[in-house]
Image (spheres, rainbow, N blue to C red):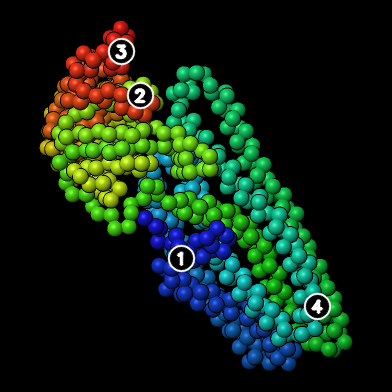
Amino acid sequence: MRTPFSGARRSSRMRNLRGLLVLLAPYRARALLTLGALLLGTAATVAPPLVAKLAIDRGIERADMTVLLACVLAFLAVALLAWAMTYLQTYLVGWIGQRVLADLRIEIFAHLQSMPLRFYESRPAGVLISRITNDVEALDTLVTDSVVTLFGAGLTLIGTIVVLLVLDLRLALLTFLALAPMAAGSVWFRLASTGAFRRTRETIGALTAYLQETLSGVIVVRAFAAERRHEARFAQLNAANRDANMATVYLNAAYFPAVELLSGLAIAGIVLYGGDQAIAGAISLGTIVAFVAALSNLFEPVQQLSQLYTTYQSGMAALEKIFTLLDERPHPADRDGSASLRPVRGEVRFEGVSFAYGARAGEQEGAQPDYALREIDLVVPAGQTVALVGATGAGKSTLVKLLCRFYNPTAGRILLDGVDLRTVRARSLRSQLGIVPQEAFLFSGTIAQNIAFGRPQASEREIRAAASALGALELIEALPQGMETEIGERGVQLSAGQRQLIAFARALIADPRILILDEATSSVDLHTEARLQRALRRLLAGRTAFVIAHRLSTIRDAAQIVVLEHGRIVERGSHEQLLDAGGPYARMHADWSVAA
């Protein structure tokens, strides 16, 4: 799925600016109204020096109270207009900016939801969190305050230049000479700060990633008394972030005071030269006063635009990282014209399936693919339970990942009720799958909410019926608030067995046609396992099921046991048939029996 604005982005700074403009496109009417307010506000800002010249030359010097009063009224009108336009543009920019940022957060979140497993395998969660938090926040100032500053200061600068030229051409040209060093300084500042601001975004992302990982693994950190080591590493990352930000501080400290100094020198020069011209009678006193007043409208916008570049650099660095993330395409992606999968019976066929991890596995010149699965041929009739056994790395989990279409086969095909999985939409396929992992991942919230996760519209009666069918209702009702018990992040307030029972109930109420159990009972004790086995028999009834297990006691009743070694099927059959064969399964069973 391409994002609404992905076509506007290329790998360049202009690409990012175009992408930002496309984000603003839905609000173009209010953006145009904001521009109108900026134009009127700018006119009100640059008008006072001209009114002051008129008041001095034609009102005060000629003792004409009518002109003077008219100028006073003009000052008041200009002030009211400036106030009204400033209010309007501030409100409109804030209104547009907050909606653009909210749209962007939703876009990033939806994009992350569509990305494949391999995307997350190579990127720390904290870095991705940083994109949707720190980087979007960096855009907040860019999209709101900086937009007003950019257009407001830019228009004020242009308007002031016009006013200066109207007031006196020679003084204006002298003033413009003072702008040359400022322009040179601005170019230097831009070149020097580009890399510095990009570095600040990188270091804050690394800091957030390490923080997220450490907090997620706090139990392991405590268990190995590794707090001091983690504090030291966090301090290193924090120091790197501090140093990156200090580089921008040094640049700001060198540049902005220099702009202030040049501004002061320029005003002093204009006052000296202009005053001499006024004494000689070459220009009027009102012109000098108006010119000096207008100079603040010249140098102040230059300073604002220079300061804006700091925010601009930080915001553009964040924008580049966000658009780079959004440019990542889901793989495997649905083909054009893919159809939704109709309700299935559940017959699964693997036909000559081979798979190698890596986006370009084996495509490099002279490289040989490192296959995780090789030439898998397997038929699982609808409603049958097949067990997958083998040593770690044999390919069991890879096989079910292919069935879920987290990856596409490197060779061969997988058929579900005779339909090639590559021709259907992944979402419609996964809606008919149920997965119970080794460690049940529960979300913060109540037990009822977690059971109904795969079917949010389920009624309270249906939720209780699912829990009761698996023998979990009694355990749940023994908790303080029963179904409404808050279980905390990842279900930390429940035991491993309770979490797994809730995961089974979550799968049952979703009523999947194909069920995948990945070591679903390996993390619990034998007493809890017996309870889970009874729940499993109810859960598996009438469904096609793939069961990955190391505890061979959990798969005795499987209609078909498939033994994998180094990505190949080396044996298949029932429990009794494989024991009688005396092959790899029999040896595994003997080893397991001794260990048990």
Q: Is residue 82 above or below residue 149?
A: below
Q: Quadrant of the N terminus?
A: bottom left
State the residue position of label 1. 22
Query: Tag 4: Cα neighbours inside 10 Å, few (<14), some, or many (≥20)?
Result: some
Mark pair 2, 1: CA separation: 52 Å
Res. 254 image quadrant: bottom right
The kind of residue tagged 4 is: Leu
Mark pair 3, 4: CA separation: 95 Å
Specify which label sits upstream in the sequence, 1 or 4. Answer: 1
State the residue position of label 2. 565
Mark whose residue sits in front, 2 or 4: 2
Can you give x and y, in whole percent of width and height, for residue 464 in the image? 14, 33
Specify which label sits upstream in the sequence, 1 or 3. Answer: 1
Q: Is residue 51 left or right of residue 443?
A: right
Res. 141 image quadrant: bottom right
Query: Tag 1: Cα neighbours inside 10 Å, few (<14), some, or many (≥20)?
Result: some
- Tell me what residue is drawn at x 30 percent, y 42 percent: 413
Find the residue positioned furthest to the front.
366
Mark pair 2, 4: CA separation: 84 Å
Q: Is residue 521 left or right of residue 196?
A: left
State the residue position of label 3. 587
The kind of residue tagged 2 is: Glu
Q: Nearer the viewer, residue 215 or 414?
A: 414
Q: Is residue 171 above or below residue 471?
A: below
The kind of residue tagged 1 is: Val
Which of the numbered marks, if any, corresponds to residue 174? 4
- Tell me what residue is drawn at x 63 percent, y 81 percent: 47
Can you give x and y, in whole percent of width and height, for residue 351 in the image? 27, 38
Specify which label sits upstream in the sequence, 2 or 1. Answer: 1
